[in-house]
């Protein structure tokens, strides 16, 4: 089902007209409402009259998370606090979170784009949707909640954690859709097996997973263990939260709700647009938000865009699953390493569990990378020689893919900490 056919199936020319009108209006509102943005535009020699359509987007300065922190908490809001009905915030590495304010209209728009996303995933009003994302300042839980209610489906707002309770409600309430992080979905599958629950008797058929990077190999793992179709959803709190984009049932890229979130892909070094179809850093301009509109916000996520019509009938541009982040990329002895590369190697090996921890250290002037990997119980209890053979196998495969040596340590099942939220995959001791 397509929720908003007029928008989701618009021609490129029709979408361009919508985007240009909304961009022009947003720039005028920001310029006259936010002194910080006005100064940035003036420093660039720009006035709102210079932005007439989306071709003029490149003239505008970029916005980064630093801009949000420099204007903490409400300095970039374009409306008075009397019009802000909701505040969310994401955790910050500098001690201050990035704060997002929503007007009533923003909340309605958010519900709309999440509803579209649910329909893309194949969810309908007869579904029972179990939301195991965290509620509170994190945008995941409430974002999916409002969109599900807007669709007319039933919500179980259980939030994250309490895994045995999650599984009990799946059995008792007949949950057909699960929303959580992909790492937590695997944790749920693990506990289902431990509880000896018959997976075939659960009514789960769709999972909508996001909030952390995950590979195609992890998708296959989740689909195999939970017997569902695993759909990728993308969002970030600065832009709106979940619902910025989502896969359809074709699973060939996430459709961006580009009538609200105007995407670009740039080279993170030169800041120039990349050629069509090339990988670069994803940049968004919000063109309908009232509380906190952002111009050319650098997400740091690396992806590429596809503009051809999807087999589902939607014409909304699609973004590929993010390859990694330009700022999360690990540089080890001059080599660029993404955790997703390591995850793909591990999930192609049947002897290990999909739980791992990367540890980066510096010995003198040399960077070292260690990897803790959980081994499946039947293999861990086997003879030492076979464990050693497995460790060598993983080490060689990683070196082949990454181009650097990795110190692999095999550990027992359940050694690595589980979380209901984003999995902690990397400990970088070089910054300590």
Image: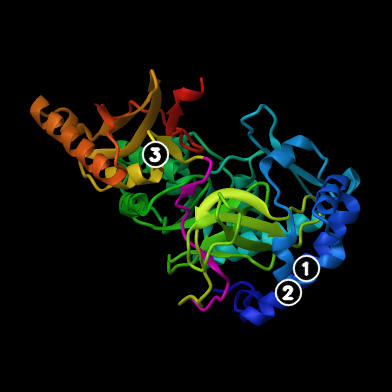
Q: State the image coordinates of residue 360 (x, y, percent, origin top left).
A: 40, 27
The residue singled out by tag 2 in the image is 18
Q: Is residue 290 left or right of residue 432?
A: right
Q: CA distance from mark 2 to mark 3?
A: 43 Å
> Do the numbered discs 2 and 1 sit on residues whose CB atoms are within 8 Å?
yes
Q: Is residue 399 above or below residue 57?
A: above
Q: Of helix, strand and loop, which one carries label 3?
A: helix
Whole-percent x, y for residue 409 in the image: 26, 27
Please name the residue that numbered disc 1 is placed on. Answer: 22
Instruction: Select label 2 or label 3 by which is in front.
Output: 2
**Residue 243 colored magenta?**
no
Q: Residue at x 74, y 55 (%)?
A: 107
Left or right position of 376 against 87: left
Q: Which residue is mark 3?
A: 187
Under circle 1, the secondary element is helix
**Count of residue discs:** 3
Looking at the figure, which quarter contains the N terminus? bottom right
């Amino acid at each position: 089902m397509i929720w908003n056919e007029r928008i989701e199936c618009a021609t490129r020319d029709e979408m361009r007209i919508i985007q240009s009108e909304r961009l022009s209006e947003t720039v005028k509102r920001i310029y006259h409402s936010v002194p910080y943005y006005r100064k940035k535009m003036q420093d660039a020699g720009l006035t709102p009259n210079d932005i007439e359509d989306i071709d003029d987007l490149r003239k505008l300065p970029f916005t980064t998370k630093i801009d949000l922190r420099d204007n903490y908490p409400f300095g970039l809001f374009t409306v008075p606090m009397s019009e802000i009905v909701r505040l969310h915030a994401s955790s910050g590495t500098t001690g201050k979170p990035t704060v997002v304010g929503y007007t009533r209209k923003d909340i309605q728009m958010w519900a709309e784009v999440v509803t579209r996303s649910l329909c893309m995933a194949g969810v309908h009003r007869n579904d029972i949707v179990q939301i195991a994302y965290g509620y509170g300042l994190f945008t995941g839980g409430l974002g999916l909640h409002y969109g599900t209610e807007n669709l007319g489906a039933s919500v179980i707002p259980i939030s994250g954690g309490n895994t045995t309770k999650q599984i009990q409600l799946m059995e008792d309430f007949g949950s057909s859709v699960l929303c959580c992080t992909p790492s937590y979905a695997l944790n749920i599958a693990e506990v289902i097996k431990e509880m000896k629950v018959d997976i075939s008797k659960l009514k789960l058929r769709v999972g909508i997973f996001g909030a952390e990077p995950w590979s195609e190999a992890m998708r296959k793992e989740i689909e195999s263990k939970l017997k569902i179709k695993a759909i990728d959803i993308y969002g970030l709190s600065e832009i709106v939260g979940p619902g910025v984009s989502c896969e359809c049932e074709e699973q060939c890229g996430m459709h961006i709700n580009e009538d609200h979130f105007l995407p670009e892909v740039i080279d993170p070094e030169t800041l120039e647009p990349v050629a069509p179809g090339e990988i670069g850093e994803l940049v968004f301009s919000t063109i309908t938000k009232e509380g906190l509109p952002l111009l050319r916000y650098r997400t740091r996520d690396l992806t590429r865009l596809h503009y051809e019509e999807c087999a589902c009938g939607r014409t909304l541009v699609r973004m590929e699953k993010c390859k990694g982040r330009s700022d999360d990329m690990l540089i080890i002895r001059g080599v660029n390493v993404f955790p997703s590369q390591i995850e793909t190697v591990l999930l192609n090996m049947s002897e290990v569990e999909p739980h791992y921890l990367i540890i980066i250290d510096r010995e003198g002037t040399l960077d070292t990378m260690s990897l803790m990997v959980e081994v499946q119980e039947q293999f861990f209890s086997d003879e030492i020689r076979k464990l050693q053979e497995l460790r060598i196998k993983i080490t060689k495969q990683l070196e082949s893919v990454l181009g650097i040596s990795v110190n692999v340590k095999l550990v027992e099942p359940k050694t690595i900490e589980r979380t209901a939220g984003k999995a902690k995959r990397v400990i970088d001791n070089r910054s300590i």
